[in-house]
Amino acid sequence: MKICIINSPLGFTKIVGDNDGITQVTVLNSQEKVTDIIPSELEDCVIQLQEYFEGLRKDFDLKLNPQGTDFQKKVWKQLETIPFGKTISYLDLSKQLGDVKAIRAAASANGKNPLWIVIPCHRVIGSDGSLTGYAGGLYRKQWLINHESESKQQSLF
């Protein structure tokens, strides 16, 4: 596994992956040394994250290799279908998965998403529009939702 640390508007970000794909993108709550030389296996991810934060990218085109249970992977695949700048509720997510009763399991899998931003778990909100739960902190979730809303508006011109 190759690892690098980059700086983003929301803090230091750890990227892990190899030739089989990116396994982890995590925002850190501590200061870290930024990687001087990015491993070639992680270069595309670094570039695409930078483009995302600059408002130049709405979708990621990366080889992903998240580690999790079959159910978690099913949830994460579903998250990838949420359009840029849009949000859905946890209830909607469970309905899309085919089982309205799976709302807690879907929310749990959402919270265990190992690919921050790339698999857009931040686009899932409470049925009442509230920003419920986010492993990276609710202020980061709000920032991401605002960023996508602003980027979407800018792209219309």
Image (cartoon, rainbow, N blue to C red):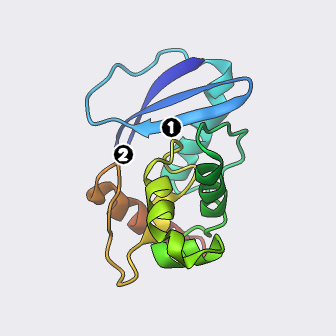
Labelled disc at residue 9: 2
Mark 1: which amino acid?
Val
Q: Residue at x 54, y 15 (%)?
A: 37
Gap between marks 1 and 2 measured at Cα? 14 Å
Mark 2: which amino acid?
Pro
Q: Residue at x 36, y 60 (%)?
A: 141
Labelled disc at residue 114: none
Q: Position of residue 114 (x, y in %)?
A: 51, 42
Quadrant occupied by the C terminus: bottom right
Q: Which residue is mark 1?
A: 25
Q: Position of residue 101 (x, y in %)?
A: 51, 75
Location of residue 1 by image quarter? top right
Q: Residues within 10 Å of mark 1 (few under 14, many from 20)?
A: many
- Nearer-the-camera pick, 123 or 109: 109
SS at circle 1: strand
Where is 120 relative to 127, above or below? above
Where is 101 relative to 110, above or below? below
Is residue 88 among the parts visible in the rendering? no
Where is 103 relative to 77, above or below? below
